[in-house]
Image (spheres, rainbow, N blue to C red):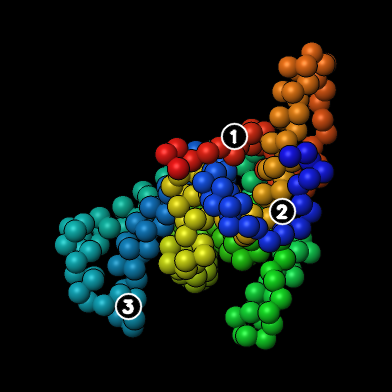
């Protein structure tokens, strides 16, 4: 297949083409991204479970009595639970700072700003069509998407907006910065930011772990790969960029085998994951 033969828009597939594409895997996430995702998931699980047990006053409580008693039994006292909550939170902040400082170019600038939260016209149209589809008001196909769809980008934008607020308010409460009044406001803002993330997280977990169409995206956070058929149908712009990169790599190998001087071919503007190796599609073992 030449680069010119790669379709510009999704086209219907034959059953043989679909079966062949379902057997090939495309790398979607690097190991570092997978590890960070699950570190973040475990940290949030621990923080939410202990945080719910700490929200108690004479006027309100977040969790039922049996949960509060269970958590105090696990940690021995609310003071120990608070120490654990703070220790996990500080560890979470430290790890994110390491990624931000040492992975700025490939992680923050490319992975986050360009891929995870960068909305384009297709993303805006996707949100519109997706909403109308849920309401049964249209039968239009969804616009092609990059490595993340618009819904995933909106959730990521929410998370990356709230994370600095959660970190700063958490540190303020931990070290009692700027006095009692400031700590009291930090507590309110902390609860608000966490609540915003949790509201999006419920949808995120449902779409990834329960919704059938998005199951491959969930498993990609374990294996790091998705099958090519899923990429073609749900993330066409990313699939096309991957195939162009792959074809360019094959063309360069062919020129080297024929004794021609290799040259650096300019990458197309729509390549969405420039940090990937050129050839990232391979047959599934045993398939």
Residue 140 seen in render? yes
The residue lying toward the viewer, choosing from 6 and 78, is 6
Q: Mark 3 falls on what kind of element?
A: loop
The residue lying toward the viewer, choosing from 158 and 223, is 223
Query: What residue is pinned by disc 2?
Result: 237
Place of residue 3 in the rendered image (x, y in percent of width and height, measured from the top left): 79, 40
Report the residue at 72% width, 59% height from top: 11
Q: CA distance from mark 2 to mark 3?
A: 47 Å
Q: CA distance from mark 3 to mark 1?
A: 40 Å
Place of residue 244 in the rendered image (x, y in percent of width and height, measured from the top left): 74, 41
Report the residue at 51% width, 62% height from top: 214
Residue 201 seen in render? no
Query: What residue is pinned by disc 1?
Result: 102
Marks 3 and 1, the one that precedes in the sequence: 3
Mark 3 neighbour class, 10 Å CA radius: few under 14, some 14 to 19, many 20 or more: some
Report the residue at 83% width, 34% height from top: 266
Marks 2 and 1, the one that precedes in the sequence: 1
Query: What residue is pinned by disc 3?
Result: 61
Which quadrant of the figure contains the C terminus?
top left
In the picture as drawn, the residue positioned furthest to the top comes out as 259
Report the residue at 34% width, 81% height from top: 60
Q: Nearer the viewer, mark 3 or mark 1?
A: 1
Q: Nearer the viewer, mark 2 or mark 3?
A: 2
Marks 2 and 3, the one that precedes in the sequence: 3
Q: CA distance from mark 2 to mark 1?
A: 29 Å
Mark 1 neighbour class, 10 Å CA radius: few under 14, some 14 to 19, many 20 or more: few
Mark 2 neighbour class, 10 Å CA radius: few under 14, some 14 to 19, many 20 or more: many
Place of residue 238 in the rendered image (x, y in percent of width and height, measured from the top left): 68, 50
Q: Mark 2 near mark 1, Cβ–Cβ under 8 Å?
A: no
Which quadrant of the figure contains the N terminus?
top right
Q: Mark 2 near mark 3, Cβ–Cβ under 8 Å?
A: no
């Amino acid at each position: 297949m030449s680069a010119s033969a790669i379709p510009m828009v999704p086209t219907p597939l034959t059953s043989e083409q679909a079966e062949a594409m379902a057997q090939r895997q495309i790398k979607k996430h690097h190991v570092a991204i997978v590890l960070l995702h699950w570190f973040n998931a475990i940290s949030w699980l621990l923080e939410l479970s202990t945080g719910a047990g700490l929200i108690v006053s004479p006027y309100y409580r977040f969790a039922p009595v049996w949960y509060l008693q269970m958590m105090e039994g696990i940690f021995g006292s609310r003071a120990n639970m608070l120490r654990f909550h703070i220790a996990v939170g500080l560890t979470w902040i430290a790890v994110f700072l390491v990624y931000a400082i040492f992975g700025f170019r490939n992680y923050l600038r490319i992975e986050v700003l360009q891929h995870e939260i960068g909305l384009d016209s297709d993303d805006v149209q996707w949100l519109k069509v997706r909403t109308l589809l849920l309401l049964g008001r249209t039968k239009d196909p969804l616009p092609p998407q990059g490595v993340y769809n618009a819904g995933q980008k909106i959730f990521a934008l929410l998370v990356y907006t709230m994370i600095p607020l959660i970190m700063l308010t958490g540190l303020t409460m931990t070290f009692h910065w700027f006095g009692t009044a400031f700590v009291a406001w930090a507590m309110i803002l902390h609860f608000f930011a966490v609540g915003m993330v949790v509201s999006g997280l419920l949808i995120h977990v449902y779409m990834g772990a329960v919704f059938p169409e998005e199951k491959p995206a969930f498993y990609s956070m374990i294996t790091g790969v998705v099958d090519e058929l899923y990429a073609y149908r749900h993330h066409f712009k990313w699939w096309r960029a991957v195939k162009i990169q792959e074809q360019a790599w094959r063309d360069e190998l062919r020129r080297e085998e024929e004794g021609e001087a290799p040259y650096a071919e300019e990458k197309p503007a729509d390549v969405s994951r420039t940090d990937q190796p050129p050839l990232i599609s391979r047959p599934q073992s045993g398939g």
